[in-house]
Image (spheres, rainbow, N blue to C red):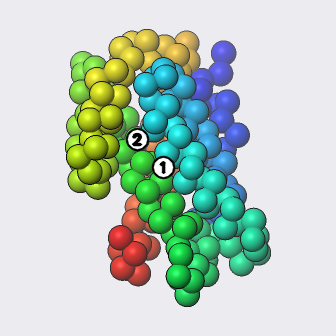
Amino acid sequence: MATYFQTCSRNYADVSITPEGIDTIQFLEATEGLVKIFDKFGAVFSVVQNDMNGNIKKIRDRYDQNPVMNSTLQNLVRGEQPEKKKTATEGLLWLTRGLDFTLQSLERSQAHPEEELSVSFTKGYEGTLRPHHGMFIRPIFSAAMKACPYRNDFYTALGDDQAVVGQDLTIWLGGLNKVVVNIQEFYTANKLN
């Protein structure tokens, strides 16, 4: 039986990164797959899914305005800078923060096999999203972190063969890390944070 990562339409490891930037469509396909992983967490994570899906829509809407010019995320953001409202730029910033949260949480979970997901995801949240959330949002996310499924249930839902799940997760996280770092460096270099 295929692992969760094998069923995604695009793996982050297969997202093209060139000197021009990250391929927009490939990034969106991989990110839509990432958002679906939160189905394994239950309804309490719908706030995370809805937020990420809203930011995906902002980027896709901008891409659809001019697919050639917006073929990379970096070109999409550059093209939006002269405009007063920078919806896709802000959407990508928040989406990247959400991706970094997922990356940090799952990397921690892999590195600490004795740790329940609620601990890994709480630590991931504290190091990524929490500094950007206000006092009204933090309790919602804190409640979601406490409602994470049991580690064993989550990893079993990702696939039957845990050795293959671990290999696929490592590859997927490696690709996600490259994408997140690339976007973060671009935003920092262009003072868009």
Q: Nearer the viewer, residue 96 or 6?
A: 96
Residue at image position (41%, 81%) is 190
Residue contact at pointers 1 and 2, CB within 8 angstroms:
yes
How many numbered badges does the structure rendering display?
Answer: 2
Distance between mark 1 and mark 2 Cα atoms: 9 Å
- x and y percent of residue 125 in the render? 29, 41
Quickly name the residue at label 1. Answer: 176
In what element is the residue under mark 2?
A: helix
The mark nearer the N terminus, 1 or 2, is 2
Q: Amino acid at mark 2?
A: Thr
Mark 2: give few (<14), some (14-19) or many (20+) Cα within 10 Å.
many
Residue 102: numbered disc? 2
Q: Amino acid at mark 1?
A: Leu
In what element is the residue under mark 1?
A: helix
Q: Is residue 72 left or right of residue 141?
A: right
- x and y percent of residue 176 in the render? 48, 49
Residue at image position (38%, 50%) is 100
Residue at image position (57%, 49%) is 54
Q: Is residue 26 left or right of residue 173?
A: right
Q: Quadrant of residue 66?
A: bottom right
- Vertical order, 60 against 51 (above or below): below
Residue 99: numbered disc? none
Residue at image position (24%, 22%) is 115
- x and y percent of residue 20 in the render? 60, 77
